[in-house]
Image (tube, rainbow, N blue to C red):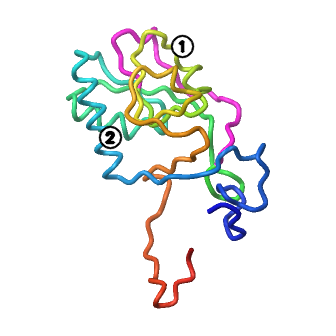
Amino acid sequence: MANDPSAPPDRPGAAARSEDLNPYKDEIVISWPELHRDARYLSRVLHGMGEWKGIIAITRGGLVPAALIARELEIRLIDTVCVVSYGASSAGGAQQKQGELTWLKMVEGDGEGWLLVDDLVDTGRTARAVRERLPKAHFACLYAKPKGRPLVDTFVKEFKQEKWIYFPWDIDYRFVTPIKHGSDAP
């Protein structure tokens, strides 16, 4: 993918991008089956830690993992912390540079006995802000990167800091014509 002149400017490998605009050099696509398997594994680990009052999902990325974990642990009490740090880029793709944090909703208390769930901790900026407000919650996420890893109590997989992660809800699966039949896709 590196030096691909056909890549959109907001994606890794785009020719018209400078390092300070996009720190990501590689990407990975997480499939629905992989995400579900990782959520079940995380649920097993969390189940071994005891009972939880409920789940607090960090929106939006934490909503799907929180739903899967809630099902596996039979947790019915679910709340959200709503904070925005990434959005869509002006080119229509994923924005890969965090903006200012915007708080839309917070929960009461310090998080004691609660499970705080997100899909990924990347730079740790959002996680740090949420942890400051819910210091006693147990923070669990599916994936972690080195800069954010110290803020998480439990996670499933660690990825390199330079890897951009596409989640199943971020992508659109489409049929690609086989090369033999005229596909010009790389």
Q: Look at the image and say whether residue 103 sits in the magenta stretch.
A: yes
- Measuring from the top left, give residue 88's x and y in whole percent: 63, 50
- Which SS type dominates the magenta stretch? loop
Label 1 crowd bin: few (<14), some (14–19), many (20+), radius 10 Å: some
Q: Is residue 157 above or below residue 45?
A: below
Q: Residue at x 50, y 39 (%)?
A: 159
Q: Secondary structure at mark 2?
A: helix
C-alpha span from label 1 to label 2: 27 Å
Whichever of callouts 1 and 2 sits on the residue coming sooner in the sequence is: 2
Magenta span covers which residues?
95-116
- Give the tally of numbered discs: 2
Q: Secondary structure at mark 1?
A: helix
Q: Which residue is more in the foreground, 19 or 176? A: 19
- Measuring from the top left, give residue 104's x and y in whole percent: 58, 28
Q: Residue at x 31, y 20 (%)?
A: 54
Q: Amino acid at mark 1?
A: Arg
Position of the N terminus, as image quadrant, is bottom right
Q: Is residue 117 above or below residue 153?
A: below
The residue labelled by disc 2 is 38
Q: Is residue 109 above or below residue 19?
A: above
Q: Amino acid at mark 2?
A: Asp
Circle number at residue 133 = 1
Q: Nearer the viewer, mark 1 or mark 2?
A: 2
Asked where in the image residue 174 lies, by quadrant, the reply is bottom left
Q: Is residue 159 above or below residue 123?
A: below
Circle number at residue 74 = none
- Measuring from the top left, give residue 125's x and y in whole percent: 62, 26
Position of the C terminus, as image quadrant, is bottom right
